[in-house]
Amino acid sequence: MDDMDDVDDADRLARYRDKRHFDRTDEPSGEGDRPGDEPSFVVQIHDASTTHFDFRLEVDGVLKSWSEPTGGER
């Protein structure tokens, strides 16, 4: 990976964070120290236009994410 790849990734993350409203939601900003050496995971209730669960699971140092709607069985 060269320096341009790092800049592109940093720019994409900056653009993403600019769209978030961390002062109005409990959404983690992703800043700060890692809690430990073990892989991490996140389960978040996302109160968006339709409430759903956001799941994030660390795989090879990257958080993979998906969402599941709330409600009854599918």
Image (cartoon, rainbow, N blue to C red):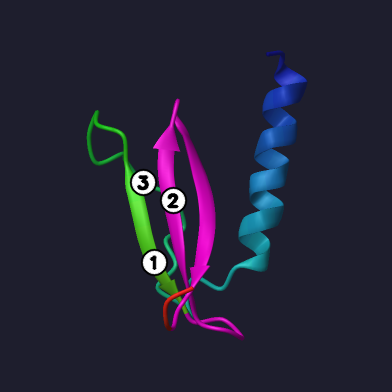
Question: Magenta: predominant secondary structure element?
Answer: strand
In terms of secondary structure, where does tag 1 sit?
strand
The answer to which image quadrant residue 53 occupies is bottom left
Instruction: Specify which label sits upstream in the sequence, 1 or 2.
Output: 1
- Residue 26: x %, y % from top left: 40, 73
Determine crowd level at label 3: few under 14, some 14-19, many 20+ residues with C-alpha closer than 10 A.
few
Q: In the image, which is nearer the foreground, mark 3 or mark 2?
A: 2
Q: Amino acid at mark 3?
A: Gly
Q: Which residue is mark 3?
A: 32
**Relative height, residue 59 to residue 41 (above, below):** above
Q: Residue at x 34, y 47 (%)?
A: 41
Range shown magenta: 47-71
Q: Residue at x 41, y 38 (%)?
A: 58
The answer to which image quadrant residue 15 occupies is bottom right
**Relative height, residue 27 to residue 9 (above, below):** below
Residues at badges 1 and 2 in contact (C-beta under 8 Å)?
yes
Query: Relative to the observer, which residue lies in front, 21 or 39?
Result: 39
Q: Which residue is mark 2?
A: 56
